[in-house]
């Protein structure tokens, strides 16, 4: 392993992988150490920094690069600007046998998300299910981080979050819903969890920003320009289409509405179209996101052995289906776990843009630089 300062002097490109050109690969432990150190230097307390590193590095490790460590510079900005509190005083209130409410106190959404799922698990251990509504929160990265935390603890987990308007309603002309993600994870004995982690838009908004930074064309039928025309140019992208694109976007729009009801209506927070923009508003203005977390204890519904046998039957039958030539049928999460295994062995790839920005953060905060594998 060679020492390399993360800077613009790093190699411009090394390979074309997925959504970006790889400038370097970094070991996950080193990446976590770097994220924690930068966030603490920017004003976060240790729990907030560690939970944020857990969420961001985990997303990058699974190949969800749009919501991985590339968000670190953004979280630095909101910490320094005052939009989020680096040392929040979160308060949890149990309101019914299986229901609780968490005031996140404008914490980093990653810290609030893990805390909320922990409380939901406590409720589920007693009642079989646990539902926690969160208010006064902020962007929490990839929703899958929190449903996955439940599954890794032996529970079925779900997580939802609303976001500022960036997505057209079906047949609409102006953005109304946010990307409003859904995640769902199930524990499976002997293997990584079954995991769904998806936006209700055609793609996440962060994917546009990623493609802008890399000057790459977007996929077709996912965004429109200011005149409402479908475009592949990330610089011209104005609004996202809902999941299903121009023809079947009513499905994604309906799911976005469901997430808004669970996240914003139940928590009393701002609706998507009322919320401050994540990127184009004051760094000092709290965004007041709402979130919703659900944990379910499988053995409260059916004995644990039968539950796991049923899961193995389902997954075995699914993966055994005939597939098109050169492909295979996968269960939700199979792609992410394959990427996790590869990146765990070879390192997390950083594209040229993030390699440069991380070098600037290293210098600015006097944080020891990352080492390239």
Image (cartoon, rainbow, N blue to C red):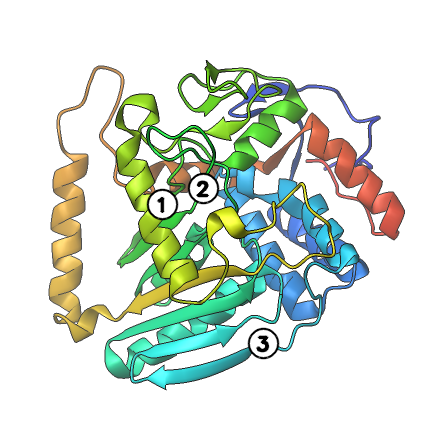
Q: Nearer the viewer, residue 287 or 1?
A: 287
Per the image, the residue denoted by label 2 is: 179
| Picture quadrant of residue 37 | bottom right
Total residue callouts? 3
Q: Tell me the residue that label 1 is attached to.
A: 256
Q: Which mark is residue 90?
A: 3
Q: Is residue 37 visible?
A: no
User: Tag 2, which secondary structure?
Assistant: loop
Residue 130 in picture, x, y percent from top left = 32, 74
Indicate which disc, 2 or 1, sits on the residue closer to the N terminus: 2
Residue 136 percent across, percent down from the top left: 56, 66
* Marks 1 and 3 in Cβ contact (< 8 Å): no
User: Could you tell me which secondary element the residue under label 1 belongs to?
Assistant: helix
Q: Residues within 10 Å of mark 2 (few under 14, many from 20)?
A: many
Task: Name the one closer to the observer, 224 or 214.
Answer: 224
267 relative position to 110: left or right = left
Q: Nearer the viewer, mark 1 or mark 3?
A: 1
């Amino acid at each position: 392993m060679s020492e390399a300062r993360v800077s613009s002097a790093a190699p411009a490109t090394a390979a074309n992988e997925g959504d970006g050109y790889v400038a370097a690969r970094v070991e996950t432990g080193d990446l976590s150490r770097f994220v924690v150190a930068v966030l603490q230097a920017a004003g976060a307390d240790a729990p907030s920094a560690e939970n944020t590193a857990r969420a961001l590095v985990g997303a990058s490790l699974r190949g969800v690069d749009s919501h991985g460590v590339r968000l670190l510079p953004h979280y630095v900005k909101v910490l320094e600007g005052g939009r989020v509190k680096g040392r929040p005083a979160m308060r949890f209130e149990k309101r019914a046998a299986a229901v609780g409410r968490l005031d996140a106190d404008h914490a980093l959404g990653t810290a609030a998300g893990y805390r909320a799922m922990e409380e939901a698990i406590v409720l589920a251990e007693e009642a079989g299910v646990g539902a926690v509504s969160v208010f006064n929160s902020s962007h929490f990265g990839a929703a899958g981080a929190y449903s996955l935390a439940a599954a890794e603890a032996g529970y079925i987990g779900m997580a939802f979050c609303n976001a500022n308007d960036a997505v057209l309603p079906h047949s609409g002309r102006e953005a109304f819903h946010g990307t409003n993600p859904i995640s769902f994870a199930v524990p499976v004995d002997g293997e990584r969890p079954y995991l769904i982690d998806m936006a209700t838009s055609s793609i996440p908004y962060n994917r546009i920003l990623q493609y802008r930074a890399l000057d790459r064309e977007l996929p077709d039928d996912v965004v429109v320009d200011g005149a409402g025309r479908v475009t592949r140019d990330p610089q011209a992208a104005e609004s996202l289409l809902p999941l299903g694109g121009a023809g079947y976007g009513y499905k994604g729009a309906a799911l976005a509405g469901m997430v808004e009801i669970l996240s914003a209506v139940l928590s009393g927070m701002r609706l998507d179209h009322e919320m401050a923009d994540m990127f184009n508003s004051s760094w000092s203005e709290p965004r007041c996101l709402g979130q919703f977390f659900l944990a379910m204890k499988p053995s409260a519904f059916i004995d644990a052995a039968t539950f796991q046998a049923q899961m193995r039957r389902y997954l075995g039958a699914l993966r055994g289906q005939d597939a098109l030539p050169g492909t295979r049928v996968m269960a939700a999460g199979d792609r992410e776990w394959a990427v996790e295994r590869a990146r765990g062995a070879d390192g997390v790839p950083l594209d040229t843009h993030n390699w440069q920005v991380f070098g600037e953060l290293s210098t600015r905060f006097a944080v020891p630089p990352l080492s390239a594998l």
